[in-house]
Amino acid sequence: MSKISVIISREFLSRVRKRSFIVSTLLMPIIIVVIILLPVYIANHVEKESKIFVLDDNDYFINKFHNTAKLKFEYPSGELDDLQQRCIAGECDAVLHILGGSQGNRANLFFFEDPPLSLKGDIAEQMDEIMFDRTLQQEFQLDIQRYKSIKELSHSDIQTLQIDEAGQAETRMVELNRIAGIVCGALIYMFVFMYANQVMRSVIEEKSNRIMEVIVSSVKPFQFMMGKIVGVALVGLTQFAMQIAFVALLLFAVQLFAPQTMMGGPAPTEVSATAGTAFDGAAVASNDADLFADISAFYSFPFSTLLICFFIYFLIGYLIYASLYAGVGSATDNETDSNQLVLPISLPLVFTLIAITIGLSPQHELIRWLSFIPFTSPMAMLYRIPSGVPLWELFVSIGLLVATFFACVWFAAKIYRVGLLTYGRKVGWRELFRWLRL
């Protein structure tokens, strides 16, 4: 056991002292915080107010547009060229020229600097409403105010609520949960292969330099393999823990020094009721100064559960693939040959990545089965968790992962024992299977 600890210590210290480890540990939390806060910021802050100069050749739309939080309409006199020059000078954000004659409600929107993406749609919506009201009056002789009151009463407002087995309901932002699942699955894909590749490269390098011949004279191949796998695993867990700590620190700093920069919009409604009970749709107001509560309400799923599961699936998923990669590394002399052997090993995760990015629902039967298969569950289960997973499925998935890890270590150790001292020939899968029977 002491020999394994020496190897673990060497692998750990040689990696955490590298500049790349320090840079990635500091840079990744910044990226994660931006990913977390950017949607919250966009949702809670309306776009800046845009001033629109209206020039109507028909004189019908004059004073008909209504100002909103994003739009302010003005109706200055003058020719189109004059208004365009005023736009260039910064007096407005755009000039709306409504064309006259037979073109009806067609218009041109002139701007000097790029306007908000929603500007064209918001203006077109108001123009359509104005023209619709005109049609109601002229063609159907309907009272506009009465029509609007009827339309308001018949307006539908649909919230998405997920119920659990106990009948409790909670607001769920389906699209956002789907994105969170994809991001977590992609991170697992990146981390597992990144650290498993480190193990394989280290094995290939030491085998090519003939260092292994000296090491295995005093250390058993199994001890050497386990030392490398655990050592790199500790590097990954250390980096992961430091990054989570830095993320929490950065979020706390934003909460402490600039909470109002992120706040400003209403939080999603939290609703709770038993099955068969009608909902009144009452919104629960959030504290605008509480950044963490705002984030939790916005994403509408428990970050703590997702974080714990990410840690578990990253660790066990890494151990499985690191064992296989270490076995492949011990059977080859260079990375070119090893890449041909690891391709079939990496296909399950690649297939899962494709499955979750093409838009399949987390409740889709394929995704559900992939969340139980040990070679695909690290990604598939994390894709499902934001949308809700029964507890027994989570335990079964983790149990299968652990059992598969011990099986992979056993198989990889047999390949490792033979492959360590195999030089000068290209090893294929047929020969690897033959080594397993030795």
Image: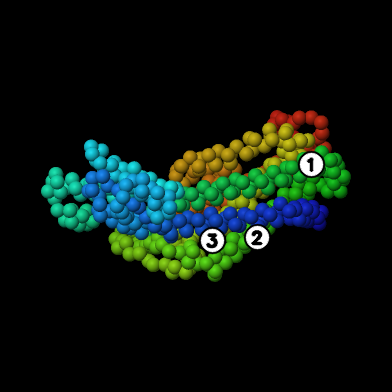
Residue 29 point in image, percent of width and height? 61, 57
Q: Nearer the viewer, residue 399 or 101?
A: 101
Tell me the amino acid under the disc marked 2: Met
- Work out whether 427 lies above or below 272: above
Q: How far apart are the two marked residues, 2 and 3, measured between alpha carbons?
A: 16 Å
Q: Earlier in the sequence, mark 1 or mark 3?
A: 1
The disc label shown at residue 304, or none: 3
Outermost residue on the left side: it is: 141
- Work out whether 91 lies above or below 350: below
Tell me the amino acid under the disc marked 3: Ser
Q: Residue at x 72, y 49 (%)?
A: 229
Q: Residue at x 76, y 36 (%)?
A: 334
Of circles 2 and 3, the one toward us is 2
**Colouring scheme, one of rainbow, by chain, secondary structure, one colour:** rainbow
Residue 95 point in image, percent of width and height? 35, 48
Q: Nearer the viewer, residue 95 or 16?
A: 95
- Work out whether 252 lies above or below 112: below
Q: Assign a secondary structure to mark 2.
A: helix
Q: Assign a secondary structure to mark 3.
A: helix
Q: Which residue is mark 2?
A: 242
Q: Is residue 145 visible?
A: yes
The disc label shown at residue 205, or none: 1
